[in-house]
Image (cartoon, grey):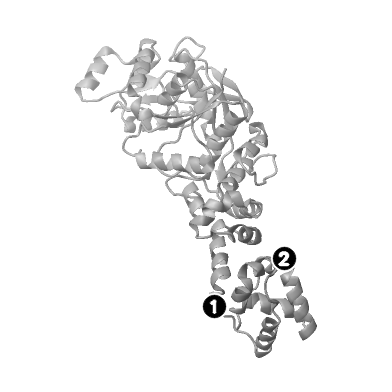
Amino acid sequence: MTVTVRFAPSPTGRIHIGNARTALFNWLFALNNKGRFIQRFDDTDIARSKQEFADAILYDLHWLGIFPDATEYQSRRFEIYDAAVERLKAAGVLYACYETPEELDLRRKVRRTRGLPPVYGREALALTTEQVAEYQADGRRPHWRFLLPNFSGDPLQPERTEIRWDDLVRGEETVDLASLSDPVLVREDGTYLYTLPSVVDDIEMGVSLVIRGDDHVTNTGVQIALFKALGAEPPVFGHHNLLTTVSGEGLSKRTGALSIESLRDDGIEPMAVASLAVLVGTSENVAAAHDLTELASHFDPAATSKSSSKFDPAELFVLNRVLLHNMPFDEARDRLMVLGIAGEQAEPFWLAVRGNLDRLADAGAWWRVLREGPREKPDFSDDDRDFLHQALDLLPEEPWNGTIWKDWTGKIREATGRKGKALFMPLRLALTGLPSGPELADLLPLMGREGTLARRP
């Protein structure tokens, strides 16, 4: 059977690194098993869901290297959910409830005072025809609850079944349905909550594996019961640990914390994001993978910790530097052209500066230094100024070869007696305006004799 996974966010904001972790877990699993990846937008909340967010999520996924085999929208599938509702009603496992929020809250408080779990007591199942007619005459519209299964044979009795499954990430899991209220599947206005469309779509789309955050573990117990009520075999489930900020706060699309958009705008490479998002909080060492195929070879969902993991953006820059320092020119070429870096010098320039970059965009600043000289003239002492004039007078004639820096500085050392920092630092400041940076042995041939002399203080 073909492995089919899905990533199903609500398009109510930009996805963050925690959402990307879920998407990547699914994508890598599909990649390792030659499966299908469905991008599904759970957009039944018409008021908050926006197409612009759906488009932005697809853009973020593409930037990470995820290209779905299919894209689906729940808002276009209401007829399928309506049919499922009628099937559940006919089976007697979806029942109408007329309580107001205030009445439900009062009942929960009463149950707590009696030492009972604050779950729904299924009072609606005992309503008479007259009571239902009275509620309807008062203008009340019902919400619809799914009748969770139990062993007693009497739905008014509290004894219920436990739902067990072998979790792909967490191992054996159990949810005691006795601790849960019968979930509302349909609101008073006829709109759907998350549970029913999600299960119906997983059935209709042939989803064989659901990988998601461990905040859904309890939901899974309910959903497995709903799968069976609809006559379907539940998929395999895997629940990975959640990511938090360094301070331990949860991530949210609404706050924009660690959004993929913000990380991209900050100049982080997609594989730095993907590598840390997947490997943090696992038994694998966090290292920068070159591409998703390489990352997939290090991916094992069972290696994920059961406790939440803190996501430190500072670690992204460590991975970012590794990726940039090893990036071949062919991969960087088009992006360098956007920065105005092109021509026959582009490749040797990239090889010279990549080892000093935190972000690829930083190459633009070094290109300007190479072409135009330091942005600001350094303030030299009289001794250093005299030294630099003498050094530039010793600059060899062209043509130059790869040993020009060594040849030139050898002559300077012999003529001035300077060595070490006293020799190299004034030269670096004069040539680049900065106290550190790429090897001058690599930059000097790119500056050329005329460009080097133009940096005379």
SS state under label 1: loop
Which labelled disc corresponds to residue 402? 2
Q: Residue furthest left?
A: 137
Query: Please, what is the three-letter code of the amino acid marked with disc 2?
Result: Gly
Residue located 28% across and 28% down the image: 189
Q: Which quadrant does the N terminus fall into?
A: top right
Spatial CA distance of label 1 from label 2 is: 28 Å
> Relative to 306, does residue 272 appear above or below in the rendering?
below
Left or right of residue 176: residue 170? right
The image position of residue 201, as x and y in percent, is 43, 23
Q: Earlier in the sequence, mark 1 or mark 2?
A: 1
> Relative to 167, does residue 433 appear above or below in the rendering?
below
Closest to the observer, 334 or 142 = 334
> Relative to 379, does residue 10 appear above or below in the rendering?
above
The image position of residue 360, as x and y in percent, is 56, 56
Crowding at dot 1, Cα within 10 Å, few <14 / some 14-19 / many 20+, comes out as few
SS state under label 2: loop
> Relative to 365, does residue 272 appear above or below in the rendering?
above
Which residue bears the numbered disc 1? 376
Closest to the observer, 109 or 386 = 386
Closest to the observer, 445 or 418 = 445
The image position of residue 122, as x and y in percent, is 40, 20
Left or right of residue 125: residue 231? right
Left or right of residue 205: residue 271? right
